[in-house]
Amino acid sequence: MVALLILAFIAITLFEVPSLIKKKMWGELAAFSVYLLIGMALTIPQALGIRLPNPTKTIEALFRPLAELLK
């Protein structure tokens, strides 16, 4: 399953990156790379059966002090 995911990410990269480079869209290429790496970092552990923490709890913990200040 992980090999299939890696092949899918490689296929997406081979399909998207050449046109971004050809058009010299460096900002878009950087954003694409960041989102692709985040996607890989989240899907590969999930495919391996590793449970990932819920990001909602982290976001909630970060913004709780701000919410308390605004009350």
Image (spheres, helix red, strand yellow):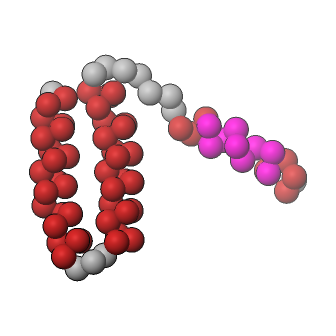
Question: Where's residue 55, x and y in %?
Answer: 53, 38
Q: Quadrant of the N terminus?
A: top left
Magenta: main secondary structure equals: helix
Q: Residue at x 23, y 71 (%)?
A: 20
| Image: 43 above or below 35 | above
- Count of labels shown? 0
Classify residue 64 by image quadrant: top right
The residue nearer to you, when weighing 38 against 61, is 38
Instruction: Answer whether residue 25 is magenta in the image.
Output: no
Would you say 33 lies left or right of 5 here? right
Question: Where's residue 18, x and y in %?
Answer: 16, 67
Would you say 43 lies left or right of 13 here? right
Q: Farthest residue to the top: give it.
A: 49
Q: Residue at x 28, y 22 (%)?
A: 48
| Image: 15 above or below 56 | below
Range of the magenta residues? 58-66
Question: Where's residue 32, x and y in %?
Answer: 33, 60
The residue nearer to you, when weighing 35 against 27, is 27
Instruction: Answer whether residue 60 is magenta in the image.
Output: yes
Would you say 4 lies left or right of 39 here? left
Q: Residue at x 51, y 32 (%)?
A: 54
The residue nearer to you, when weighing 58 against 23, is 23
| Image: 9 above or below 29 | above
Classify residue 5 by image quadrant: top left
Q: Farthest residue to the bottom: give it.
A: 23
Q: Residue at x 34, y 46 (%)?
A: 37
